Amino acid sequence: MTGSAEFFDEMHDADGGVRDAYSDYCTWFDEQKTGLLKRKHAEAETNFRKTGITFNVYGEDEAEERLIPFDMVPRVITAAEWRKLTRGIEQRVSALNAFMHDLYHRQEIIRAGRIPERLFRDNAAWLPNMVGFTPPGGVYTHIVGIDLVRTGPDEFYVLEDNARTPSGVSYMLENRETMMAMFPELFMRVPVEQVSDYPRRLAKSLAACAPACTKGKPTVAVLTPGIYNSAYFEHAFLADQMGAELVEGSDLRIVDGRVQMRTTSGFQPVDVIYRRVDDDFLDPLTFNEDSVLGVPGIMDVYRSGGVTIANAPGTGVADDKAIYSFMPEIVEFYTGEKPLLPNVETHRCAEEETLKYVLDNLEDLVVKEVHGSGGYGMLIGPAASKKELEEFRKKIVAKPENYIAQPTLSLSTCPIFTKKGLAPRHVDLRPFVLVSPDKIDITPGGLTRVALKEGSLVVNSSQGGGTKDTWVLKD
Amino acid sequence: MLGRTANGLFWMFRYLERAENTARLLDAGLRMALTRDLVTAEEEWRSVISTAGQRTGYEAKHGTYTGMQAWNYMLRDKDNPASILAMFGQVRQNARLCRNAISGELWEAINENWLVIKDQLAKPVGENRVLATVASIRRAGTLAHGAMEGSMLRDEGYHFAQAGTFIERGDSIARILDIKYYLLLPSLSYVGSSLDTGQWDQVLRSVSGDRAYRWLNAGQIDARGICDFLILDDCFPRSLAFCHSELRANLAALARLHGKEGLSNELMREADTRLSDLTIDRVFDQGLHEFLLEFMSGNAAIGNAIAQDYRFLA
């Protein structure tokens, strides 16, 4: 990795001038005393500890709760940029939903020869039980997180689609709360779009997907694997903010053909389950029989229209990175339009010639497992040692269809606050998208993840990344 | 409300009450230690640990009673499942479990308490900071109760929390009285001795009742008067009569909200019959020990009935 000049700096242009998006912020910033900002920086952490926004790290002591580091310099997006992104995201998400329906019905896209059948036949997330079944309202992907990266003034790429159970939205909300508590005057000076009504929008969107058998106002519940899950805080937070019940598998039971929860006055039907439990654990009768997190028989109720499960079981197919590589074709097939948001160029190691190219250029590429997530099981060629490269080469050769490769992207940077002042770090962006039968709703903002280590391109919180408040400016 | 959530609220407040009661006992013990000589100190600390119901565990670990060992055992010993640190851990765990049934203010109070207490009890507590530590633990309880009173919806969740508080408090007061009366004095000939009055004084302090008792009884310390006060005075918020009257109100509210009465309401009525028109003379005629045992088992039965009536467990 050479000097930072080759990366797009979102705050400053090549001559060191401040870009439009950040001009109000920088004016304010320059008026602040450094000592005060340092104190505020420490204050932010206390605030997060106090409210209990923590996550549990896999493999660590169960009682261990960590904070995701928060950086107090906001990531700013202009209204015009956001409008463009919104159109691209809407297009992509509606294509994803149509793709899911097609995949579990007539499979027109495969008949048309646009994607190979093996893609989903080999996919562990593919669920044969979903074939021929349409979820209430025809919605598969109720909540989607689209991971975007930026490389230039007008260049945004989709890096990943998270259609299974995207997490992190509580950070979008709490980062904003923290920023408003620390710097109220900033929000009086800079017109920023609100994100705080996300839980209300989520509740509304989920309620709109309730099954036909719902009587009166739909009952929505968040299904969590429990208190030791890494994202438990978020599950509890969203349930609280939506005014929904927070249930575990042991609270639910099938009674009279409905999924019902054990309340203090007996069993009561649940209409919509926002599940934060993986497909595998959803129903021990259908999937993993050892699961104690799920509800025996829930899939039968689901298939007979007695409950809505969000996201629909089987949507994890779309998170697969081999499927991702076909997204341009998928978008075009279902929308009849060229994709507004481009994919990152992706090499499928399953294809023989491509494999050769990947192996020949390993030190310049980023290689990912097709089913991997969270930054695990990936190789960043330019940052890897000879030994790491050789070990990864063996893994790819042994199972090429398990890997895809992408060029090392020149991810944009946004400054973070350090002891020595502002310093550029690489960022990505995850906006949160809600899908209901008649609407795709995108909250103006999202989760900006930032690699805190100088030069690092890995933004995942499990790998030392932090987060920033994300501002979408009003017109 | 989910049965599991109701269970979480009930136990969150039982553990909070238990932690506070242990802190009160410890506070009383520490004050005593400041005014007594070293010869009797061992006896005092044995009585504090016994009253907290932690004697077996303590003696399995330590052969002697010293202040430093005793308070560190009660505050933070990893082998003591009833240590204050363990209790606050349970309080927070339950608060996390029913996070969407408690107000943000209450959650933050509990979470902050936990952070402060965990920090204070991270290392052994020496003489120079033990009083301040106990004081901050007691403030933590006060903060949580205040946050709850000022911000929680008076729905069933509130009544489950309150029921947990008063069941635990009643149990704790009965236990303290029982241990004092039957276990602490070396023999009957000590009744009325300075050791005896000293221990009664400690009992009053450990339930924060010393000032109220003095106010009502002009400083006269005697066993019968103190038992009368701690069992039957319906103005003192830590008497058995008071705990029962609060519990009765909470159970009635729960029955009203659910539109029907359950086993817990039935048992509550039976307990009322036992307590109504009771005088301290009748208690002593029956035998204090027998009376307290009956009270504790009745109290525990009501607790179990609440869990059953409101489907706490699958």
Image (spheres, helix red, strand yellow):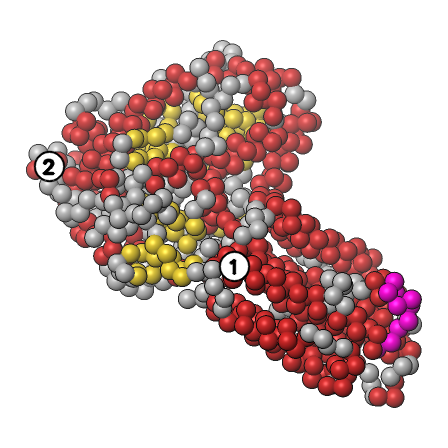
Magenta part of the protein: which range? B214-223
Q: Is residue A325 visible?
A: no
Q: Quadrant of residue B173?
A: bottom right
Give the image quarter of residue A459.
top left
Q: Residues within 10 Å of mark 1 (few under 14, many from 20)?
A: few
Quadrant containing the C terminus of chain A is top left
Image: B65 above or below A58: below
The residue drawn where x is 80% and y is 64% is: B209
Left or right side of B272 for B39: right
**Which numbered disc covers residue B151?**
none
Query: Nearer the observer, disc 2 or disc 1?
Result: 1
SS assignment at label 1: helix
Q: Residue A134 location, x and y as percent?
A: 19, 44
Task: Name the residue carrying label 1.
Answer: B256
Question: Looking at the image, which residue sits at the far front?
Answer: B277
Helix or strand or loop: what does disc 2 sit on?
Answer: helix
Which picture quadrant has residue B293? bottom right
Q: Amino acid at mark 2?
A: Glu
Residue B90 as seen in the image, left or right of residue A352: right
Pick the front one: A216 or B199: A216
Residue at left offset 54%, top offset 38%: A69
Q: Are marks 2 and 1 on the same chain?
A: no
> Where does residue B203 sit, x and y in percent of width and height?
80, 71
Q: Please, is residue B193 above or below residue A294 in the view?
A: below
In this rendered view, identify the residue nearer to me: B50 or A44. Answer: B50
Q: Is residue B261 magenta?
A: no
What x and y, as percent, mark residue B299?
Answer: 61, 73
Residue carrying label 2: A108
Q: Amino acid at mark 1?
A: Arg
Q: Nearer the viewer, residue A66 or A297?
A: A297
